[in-house]
Amino acid sequence: MVLDTRPVASPLPPRPARRKRYPGHAVTGLKGFAFTAPFFAGFALVFVAPFGYALYQSLYSEQLSSDGLGGSRTVFVGLSNFTRALGDGDYWTSILRVCVFALIQIPVMLGLSLLAALLLDLATGRRARLFRLGLLVPYMIPSIVATLVWLYLYSPRLGPITRATAWFGADVNMFSPNLLWIGIGNLLTWVGIGYNMLIIYGSLRSVPRELFEAARLDGAGELRIAWSIKIPHVRSALVLTGMLAIIHMLQIFAEPLVFRVTSPETVTAGFTPIMMIYNLAFTQGNYNYAAALSVLLAVVVGAVSVLFYRVSSREAL
């Protein structure tokens, strides 16, 4: 007797029943798209279209006629503006200057914002509302106005900071090259604390309160609760605020532009990437090269943001 040793094929699992599509599904999908259409239209109009136009302008250049009497004409130069930008030492120096400044200013600002959010979480009732409103006031003030206010406070002749330090025998000039970065960093921190604090505080309020009560029953103090429970729970909010701060820092413009009035030797026309682009476009009239620098800056901002997000997300695993 011969036995059949061939494997017996297992029966195929039943195919899932196809979902019936009702006539109303298509209409519902169109309604959902209609709700999101304004966002995509605004995104295309505000972000995609300017970027595409800048990319288009960066492929051209203004050239004078050979005899210099026929005016200028726009010619297609391909990637020449980008080749020139990649070798522009002043441009990359301005980006490096801002990045080094960001390595110091952003951790300080986020640390103070985290501390403010933790203190606000401990406060209750009217004190919490006053604390929250007080920290938001600097963010409500336009950056130009805030810069002018701090210029007055830093003023060696009129400002109170120089007089206050003079009482202790110190000669502090916030407009000097050594202290100018501290002055700008203090201004950016003052403006950004409230905004970042609200994002971190919103994430903090989503933590279940039962965890705090359980930790207190186990004898944990407020510092231990903050370090072991609260701060790990707001890690995603810190990553978000850090990425927003990096994007803002690489595009910093108004604050150093106003400080340039008082310290033109230190804050040059190409002090930051945006200042250099602004000077090229609206002072020198070189729109095409400024457009190429703008496209490169957008690429740098995107690359740094993605790198920061991936590194911070990997550490969170």
Image (spheres, helix red, strand yellow):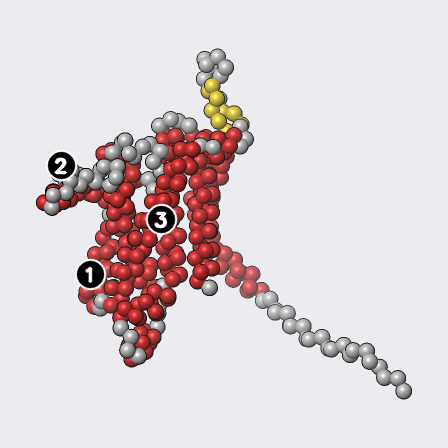
Q: How far apart are marks 3 and 2 (CA)?
A: 32 Å
Give the foreground label among 3 and 1. 3
Residue labelled with disc 2: 157
Who comes first in sequence, dot 1 or dot 2? Answer: 1
Which residue is located at x 30 percent, y 60 percent? 114
**Numbered tag placed on residue 261 in the rendering:** none
Q: Is residue 227 visible?
A: yes
Residue labelled with disc 3: 103
273 lies left or right of 33: left
Position of residue 152 relative to residue 265, above or below, is below
Q: How far apart are marks 1 and 2 (CA)?
A: 34 Å
Picture quadrant of residue 161 = top left
Give the foreground label among 3 and 2. 3
92 lies left or right of 139: right
Q: Residue 240: horizontal and vertical position, in percent?
A: 39, 56
260 lies left or right of 63: left
Q: Residue 228: horizontal and vertical position, in percent?
A: 34, 69
Q: Within 10 angstroms of label 3, few (less than 14), some, or many (20 or more) residues?
A: few
Give the foreground label among 1 and 2. 2
Who comes first in sequence, dot 3 or dot 1? Answer: 3
Position of residue 24 relative to residue 187, above or below, is below
Which residue is located at x 68 percent, y 75 percent? 14
Which of the pair 238/141 is nearer the observer?
Answer: 238
Position of residue 147 relative to residue 6, above or below, is above
Q: Residue 255: horizontal and vertical position, in percent?
A: 28, 41
Q: Can residue 251 be seen in this view?
A: no
